Amino acid sequence: MMMQVAMALKPPSFRILRKNPQRFRTSPTRIRYASLSVWASTESLADPPPSLFLGYSTRTDFPILHQEVNGSKLIYLDNAATSQKPSAVLKAIQYYYESYNSNVHRGIHYLSARATEEYELARKKVASFINASDSREIIFTRNATEAINLFALSWGLQNLKQGDEVILTVAEHHSVIAPMLDTAKKTGAVLKYVSLNEDGVPDVNMFKQLMSTKTKLVIVHHVSNMLGSALPIEDVVVWAHDVGAIVLVDACQSVPHMVVDVQKINADFLVASSHKMCGPTGIGFLYGKYHHLSAMPPVLGGGEMVADVFLDHYTYADPPSRFEAGTPAIGEAIGLGAAIDYLSGIGMQRIHDYEVELAKYLYESLGTVPGIRIYGPAPSENVYRAALCSFNVENIHPTDIATFLDQQHGVAIRSGHHCAQPLHRVLDVNASARASLYFYNTREEIDNFIHALNDTVSFFNSFK
């Protein structure tokens, strides 16, 4: 028996499936949504896999996705740069400004007390989301870039000295490389870079080779924003701690997409950005073990970061206030808290499992495009690959690809160096195109993207 579901209908929610499994007990049943066809057994329908509905069931929460761009239905594949925001986040920010807009920590009236409560609740939500042991270990910053700079200007300048070694990889984001180059210039520390192995990913074995008693800091990405590869962070942390070094993890491409447990990882510091995890722009965070934070000097002086001020000196407040001078991004923090509520409601493991399937489908689908070169590892049972692909097509500039996709097909991808120029130089290319997915993307969108990309390639090849 076959059950046909009209394209116009919303996919049934997981709650409906669980409450009424008998409605869908057809063995086997074929369910069709647009171009998506999945064979499902009786057992899987009783508790359907995330690959069946997650992209479809969440899309209604994102108003921006339901529009046309240049005459075509928008296909948004630039999530590694910034994610879209669900209605729950937009409403939380609007409600703050409409209902209890006030400064925090400074007033006893109702609005200020309410704003302070919600602002600090957002900090607790971040701490819980990454399993920090204490909310005081979360420092709000404008973004991950500012978080890394705060670390470099505080911990870096205080602790690094002439001849100390800092280990990075050639695949780091400019937000890591630039502040560490400045710090090394000021302190005399030496930067050492882990290169790529024959598989085109950072060479894990080289971490062990570079580490020594001179190593004071390891600062690396968790997931590469260009290669889509992941580092074995727990192992790197163990190796670093064995030689007395500390570790800062750039988790901008992992926190939004998987379960990240800072206590399990045991990294000393970690940074992430709100805007890549369904939250607003203008806020990110630095996680740091409290004993490190309490020993670090502030970077900015002014209101909120002081304990006592005299005419000839002042004393620091305890973390996190020490590092949050001035009026903070209150509405943005509340929006980040709402984003965390939203992601937690879906479940980060469920998001991760779904994106693993999307990543494999994207990689394999791109591989069918003539003349394409995809950077980073091929996904497999043993190799994790994030749901993003940076690529080039022979004899076509990536910016031409991105422009044509946008103007002719309404497909939004990224082109350029993705704030990873050193990595592009290692790969001997000036730029690349990048398609990056999130849990609200679907296989149907990937199919449409591949169709559009093939059309783009054919168009430019017609001039040869």
Image: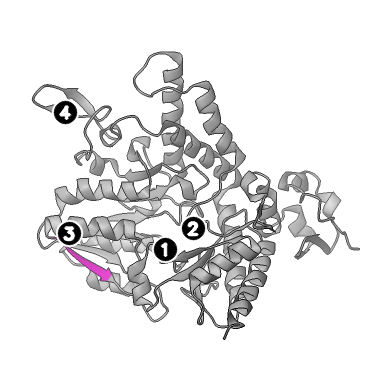
Mark whose residue sits in front, 3 or 4: 3
Residue 52, percent across and down? 71, 58
Please tell me which of labels 1 and 2 falls first in the chain: 2
Q: Which residue is mark 2?
A: 80
Q: Which mark is residue 184?
A: 3
Q: Position of residue 262 (x, y in %)?
A: 39, 49
Label 4: which secondary element: strand
Q: What is the secondary structure assignment of the residue under circle 1? A: loop
Q: Main secondary structure of the magenta part?
A: strand
In this view of the protein, which residue sits in the foreground, 28 or 418? 418
Can residue 245 be seen at all in this image of the molecule?
A: no
Counting residues from the N terminus, which is met first, the one under dot 4 or under dot 2? 2
**Is 40 situated above or below 350?**
below
What residue is pinned by disc 1?
Answer: 418
Range shown magenta: 189-193
Spatial distance from mark 4 to mark 1, Cα to Cα?
A: 41 Å
From mark 2 to mark 3, how far is it between C-alphas?
Answer: 29 Å
| Residue at screen point 64% across, 67% down | 449
Q: Nearer the viewer, mark 1 or mark 3?
A: 1
From the image, state whether disc 4 or disc 1 is nearer to you.
1
Neighbor class of circle 1 (other Cα within 10 Å; few <14, some 14-19, many 20+) is many
